[in-house]
Structures are given as C-alpha cells and as structure tokens.
Image (cartoon, rainbow, N blue to C red):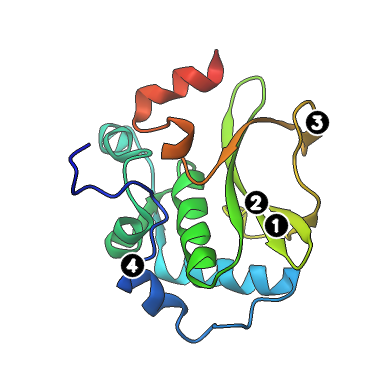
Amino acid sequence: MRPSDPKSQVETTKKIRDVVKDLESKIIAPEDLVRLRTLVFKKIRTIPYSKQSAAHEKSIRWKRTADEILRDGYVYQGKSCTDLVVSFIALCKALKINARFVKVKNENLVHSLAEVKLGKDWYIFDVSNPKSIPEKGELKSGTEWGGWSLWKKGRDAWDLGLVEFESIRRIKN
C-alpha cells in the first residue's frame, strides 16, 4: 500500500458525509439501522455475477474503500456482503455510531456481518440480506449465529488481513 492510500475501508470522506447528512442523530433504534441499510441499497446497485464477470469481481474483492464502492455504485450479486457491510459501517462511523466488521464462516462459505452498538446494546445485522433485521447480541468465539461461526472481528476487512481475493485462504484454513 502506498503512503497516500487509505488505511481503512471505512474512512469518513466528504462522499460518506454527504450520504448521511440528513440522518444526523436519527439512528437510535434497531429499526433505524434498517433505514440506513435501505439507504446503502439505494446508493449501490447489484449487478449480475457471471463467468464473464468473475475475473473482475476477484480483482476488486476486498480492495475497495466505502468511498470507492459508493462512487462506483455497484456490487456483484452473491459476492457483495463485504462491500455492503463496509459501506454500512462507514455510514455508521460518519454518524458517530460504533460499528464493527464481522467475518463468519460455515463448512463451505464465508460471509460478512456488522455489529452495531446502539446505547449500551450490541446488535448483529446481516446488512447484505434485505430481509434481515438487527438482532440484539454480539457474536462470541465458539458461538453460532444462523449457522455461521465467528472467524474474526475488526474495523473492516483490511483490519482482518483480507486485502485481495487470495486472502480467503486465511479464513478457510
């Protein structure tokens, strides 16, 4: 990484602040997190993933910042959980809401979630699932949530050492 590169995928930029400018101090309950996720889905469209797009998807996986994701305006269907969670966490950060990136796995797959602190309570939120609602609690080592087990938590994917497609080997081993 060059010295001028961002150190975090969730840095608060002008673009991020502009997206949330009308939401200041309005995120106080779990249902407000659903509204914030809806805003993410309005800013980022899901495009089809195919054999033709596979190489491009692998070339950008875990490499974009929230600012870049929002500027690009797209994620790949079925391959978007990290980008959506990173974007969501960046918006939370801009609103001064404590949120963290959670990487989970099961036998065959990996997935990204957010944990968000509202008041004194943490909520687990599957940002990439449009039907998901925040659930009170936080993932702990050795526990499962919806068939997923915790791999690691951090600020963003980069904080967990996920910086390119081949990083997936770290999770699956």
Label 3, label 1: how many angstroms apart (C-alpha)?
Answer: 19 Å
Residue 31 location, quadrant: bottom right
Mark 3 or mark 1, whichever is nearer to me: 3
Q: Are marks 1 and 2 in contact (CB under 8 Å)?
A: yes
Q: In the rendered image, which residue does mark 1 sit on?
A: 132
Q: Residue at x 63, y 83 (%)?
A: 26
Mark 1 or mark 4, whichever is nearer to me: 4
Label 3, label 2: how many angstroms apart (C-alpha)?
Answer: 16 Å
Q: Residue at x 54, y 65 (%)?
A: 92
Q: Residue furthest top?
A: 173
Q: Amino acid at mark 1?
A: Ser
- How many numbered callouts? 4
For mark 1, give the secondary structure: loop
Mark 4 or mark 2, whichever is nearer to me: 4
Viewer-proximal residue among 2 and 36 = 2
Q: In the rendered image, which residue does mark 2 sit on?
A: 126
